C-alpha cells in the first residue's frame, strides 16, 4: 500500500531533494542577472515583490516559463533557460519547492527554491517594490509583472 502524505510532509520530502538558497544568496543572484520568478498569486503580489523578479503564478508556471523576456527571443527558449540559474519564491518556500521539483522534472538543473520565501525576505528588511512599480505584461490573456526593463 502506498504511504499517504499530507501537503506538509510532501513539501518536507521535496525540500530535501531540491536545491534551496537563502535570501542572501538570492540577493547575490539578482545582482548577477539570474532569473527570479515570483510564483505567488496575484493578490499576494499586490502586497509587493522582490525587485528584479518576474511574476508567473504557480498554476501556469510550466506552461508560461518560455515566455520570459530573458529567453523568449531565443530560437529554443527552453534550452536557453536550461543554461541560466532560475530562482523561485512564494510566500513561505513550500510552493516554490514544489515548483522547483516540477522544473527539475522538465530537465532544468539550475533551479533553486528560496527558503522562507517572501516572508523571510520581508523579515530581513530587504527591499521590495509594489506591483504598480513593476511592468505589466500579458501572455495568452494572463497578466504578469516584471520590474521595468526585463530580466
Image (cartoon, rainbow, N blue to C red):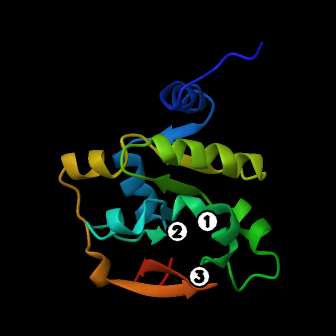
Residue 114, numbered label: none
- In the image, what residue occupies the spot 58% across and 86% down? 141
How far across and how far down the image is residue 134, in percent? Answer: 35, 82
Q: Nearer the viewer, mark 3 or mark 1?
A: 1
Quadrant of the image occupied by residue 30? bottom left
Disc 2, SS: loop
State the CA–CA distance, disc 1 to disc 2.
Answer: 7 Å
Q: Nearer the viewer, mark 3 or mark 2?
A: 2
Residue situated in front as seen by the camera: 47 or 70? 47
Residue 60, numbered label: 1
Say which residue label 2 marks: 56
Evaluate whether residue 50 shows in this view.
no
- In the image, what residue occupies the spot 61% across and 65% down? 60
Q: Is residue 75 above or below residue 105?
A: below
Residue situated in front as seen by the camera: 65 or 80? 65
- In the image, what residue occupies the spot 58% across and 43% down? 98
State the CA–CA distance, disc 3 to disc 1.
Answer: 16 Å
Quadrant of the image occupied by residue 73? bottom right
Q: Is residue 116 left or right of residue 99?
A: left
Residue situated in front as seen by the camera: 1 or 84? 1
Q: Quadrant of the N terminus?
A: top right
Say which residue label 3 marks: 69
Q: Is residue 24 above or below residue 64?
A: above
Residue situated in front as seen by the camera: 50 or 34? 50
Amino acid at each position: 500500500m502506498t504511504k499517504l502524505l499530507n501537503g506538509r510532509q510532501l513539501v518536507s520530502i521535496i525540500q530535501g531533494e531540491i536545491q534551496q538558497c537563502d535570501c542572501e544568496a538570492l540577493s547575490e543572484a539578482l545582482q548577477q542577472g539570474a532569473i527570479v520568478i515570483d510564483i505567488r498569486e496575484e493578490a499576494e503580489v499586490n502586497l509587493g515583490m522582490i525587485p528584479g523578479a518576474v511574476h508567473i503564478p504557480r498554476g501556469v508556471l510550466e506552461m508560461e516559463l518560455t515566455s520570459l523576456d530573458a529567453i523568449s527571443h531565443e530560437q529554443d527558449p527552453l534550452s536557453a533557460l536550461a543554461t541560466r540559474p532560475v530562482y523561485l519564491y512564494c510566500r513561505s518556500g513550500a510552493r516554490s519547492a514544489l515548483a522547483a521539483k516540477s522544473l527539475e522534472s522538465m530537465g532544468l538543473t539550475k533551479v533553486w527554491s528560496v527558503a522562507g520565501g517572501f516572508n523571510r525576505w520581508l523579515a530581513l528588511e530587504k527591499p521590495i517594490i509594489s506591483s504598480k512599480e513593476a511592468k505589466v505584461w500579458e501572455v495568452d490573456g494572463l497578466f504578469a509583472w516584471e520590474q521595468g526593463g526585463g530580466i
